[in-house]
């Protein structure tokens, strides 16, 4: 059956390319792949090229920007399907763009959605445990990601990920550049500091910034020109997004993997002072179950209060998801059910509970949804807006 699927995907990819005239081959195509940090890195590269006066389009998890216009990708979409992707490439060509930055998922690689695309340079953020429900093992997942890296003309690889040692021997591209904040590499963050990189990038943004910088250097742009453009980057919606509302402090982030939780809490403790951290999160249903206990444990190590809630549970019983996350929480002896961690299936009510339990100097952290505009419940998609939910939760109670 898998071979038949591969043949089906290949035919769709071939027909899509043929229909639109293999448009990506007429663009300078830049790919960004990895487990965490893809969206920020994609947007950093596109922003830097735009700031340097280049014509560039891009597609990331938050949507497509083609010819200066924004297009939604639909629910839970990062790399568009076969015909939609080639249509975007063709539209980009017609708009006069020279560069195209594409966020590429492991599903898109495995399903041949990017077949026919020739990548000038690919950036690899990291590879940590994720999507093992689909790929079945870390090795298969890593090899899928690295297929894109190894087939590109050149690639830039972040070495800071704790799991780098698990996949570095699969890298075969002869034109590789390594970047690292904490480790020795071809490019270290100290090199960017000497060039004048701004000082308020947090720990994981530094990793993304190095990748964006080195991609532009591989493309032939001058160092100081790249740094100047990169310094004006503004964070993507739903990525480490801090704000105050209704007398409470909030931070919204798309973090939904163990590694992203580690990096998120590390950055929070570096950048914010808070009496307590209150964490609202869940795990997606019908997806990788191996990460749930890990995420519960990481949250329990860092948060003072935890409220477990929905995050696209689909047809999986949410009680089972909660129980698997709770396994990790219970390993931290200071966490006690109904005292320091709670279950609230409805996400709106979970946010209300967080606000109710909080005090002005606490920080309420909401992860997993961020920019997404729907919640998958059973077999239906329901409209969702994380920011509107916060607004509702903090609105004064005007009931009689």
Image (spheres, grey):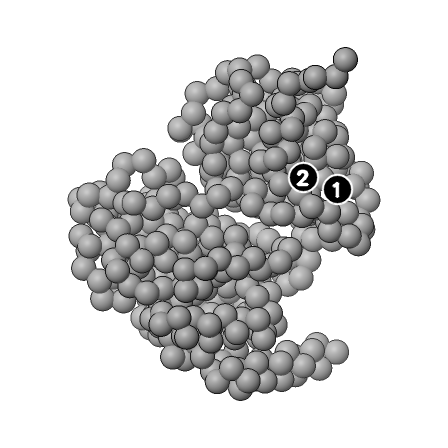
> In the depicted view, which residue is nearer to us: 363 or 180?
363
Q: Determine the residue positioned at 56% across, 45% down.
A: 371
Labelled pair 1, 2 in contact (Cβ < 8 Å): yes
Q: Quadrant of the C terminus?
A: top right
Alpha-carbon span between mark 1 and mark 2: 8 Å
Q: Which quarter of the figure has residue 46? A: bottom left
Res. 207 in view: yes
* Mark 1 / mark 2, whichever is N-terminal: 2
Q: Residues within 10 Å of mark 2 (few under 14, many from 20)?
A: many
In terms of secondary structure, where does tag 2 sit? Answer: loop
Q: Position of residue 394 (x, y in %)?
A: 61, 23
Q: Residues within 10 Å of mark 1 (few under 14, many from 20)?
A: many
The correct choice, above or below, for 139 with respect to 318 in the image is below
Res. 155 in view: no
Q: Which residue is mark 2?
A: 282
In terms of secondary structure, where does tag 1 sit? Answer: helix
Q: Quadrant of the N terminus?
A: bottom right
Q: Position of residue 15 (x, y in %)?
A: 59, 85
The correct choice, above or below, for 83 with respect to 58 in the image is below
> In the depicted view, which residue is nearer to us: 174 or 43?
43
Q: Position of residue 16 (x, y in %)?
A: 57, 81
Q: Which residue is mark 1?
A: 321
Q: Determine the residue positioned at 48% across, 29% down.
A: 243
């Amino acid at each position: 059956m898998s071979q038949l699927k591969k043949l089906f995907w290949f035919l769709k990819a071939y027909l899509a390319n043929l229909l639109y005239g293999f448009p990506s081959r007429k663009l300078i195509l830049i790919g960004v792949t990895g487990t965490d940090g893809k969206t920020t890195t994609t947007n950093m590269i596109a922003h830097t090229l735009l700031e340097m006066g280049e014509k560039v389009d891009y597609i990331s998890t938050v949507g497509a920007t083609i010819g200066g216009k924004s297009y939604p990708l639909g629910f839970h979409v990062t790399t568009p399907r076969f015909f939609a992707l080639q249509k975007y490439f063709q539209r980009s060509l017609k708009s006069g763009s020279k560069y195209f930055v594409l966020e590429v998922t492991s599903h898109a690689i495995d399903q041949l959605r990017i077949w026919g695309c020739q990548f000038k340079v690919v950036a690899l953020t990291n590879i940590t445990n994720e999507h093992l429900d689909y790929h079945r093992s870390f090795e298969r997942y890593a090899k899928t990601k690295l297929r894109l890296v190894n087939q590109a003309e050149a690639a830039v690889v972040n070495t800071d990920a704790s799991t780098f040692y698990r996949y570095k021997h699969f890298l075969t591209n002869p034109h590789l550049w390594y970047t690292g904040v904490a480790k020795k590499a071809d490019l270290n963050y100290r090199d960017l500091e000497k060039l004048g990189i701004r000082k308020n990038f947090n720990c994981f943004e530094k990793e993304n910034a190095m990748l964006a910088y080195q991609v532009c250097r591989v493309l032939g742009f001058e160092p100081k020109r790249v740094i100047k453009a990169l310094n004006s980057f503004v964070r993507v919606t739903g990525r480490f997004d801090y704000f105050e509302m209704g007398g409470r402090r909030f931070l919204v982030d798309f973090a939904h993997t163990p590694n992203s939780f580690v990096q998120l809490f590390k950055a929070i403790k570096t950048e914010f002072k808070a009496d307590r951290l209150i964490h609202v999160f869940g795990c997606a249903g019908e997806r990788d179950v191996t990460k749930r206990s890990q995420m519960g444990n990481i949250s329990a190590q860092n948060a003072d209060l935890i409220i477990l809630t929905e995050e696209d549970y689909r047809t999986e019983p949410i009680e089972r998801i909660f129980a698997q996350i709770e396994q990790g929480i219970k390993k931290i002896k200071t966490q006690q059910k109904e005292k320091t961690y709670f279950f609230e299936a409805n996400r709106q009510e979970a946010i209300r509970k967080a606000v109710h339990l909080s005090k002005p100097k606490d920080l309420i952290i909401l992860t997993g949804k961020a920019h997404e505009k729907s919640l998958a419940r059973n077999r239906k998609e329901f409209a969702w807006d994380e920011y509107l939910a916060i607004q509702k939760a903090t609105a004064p109670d005007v009931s009689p």
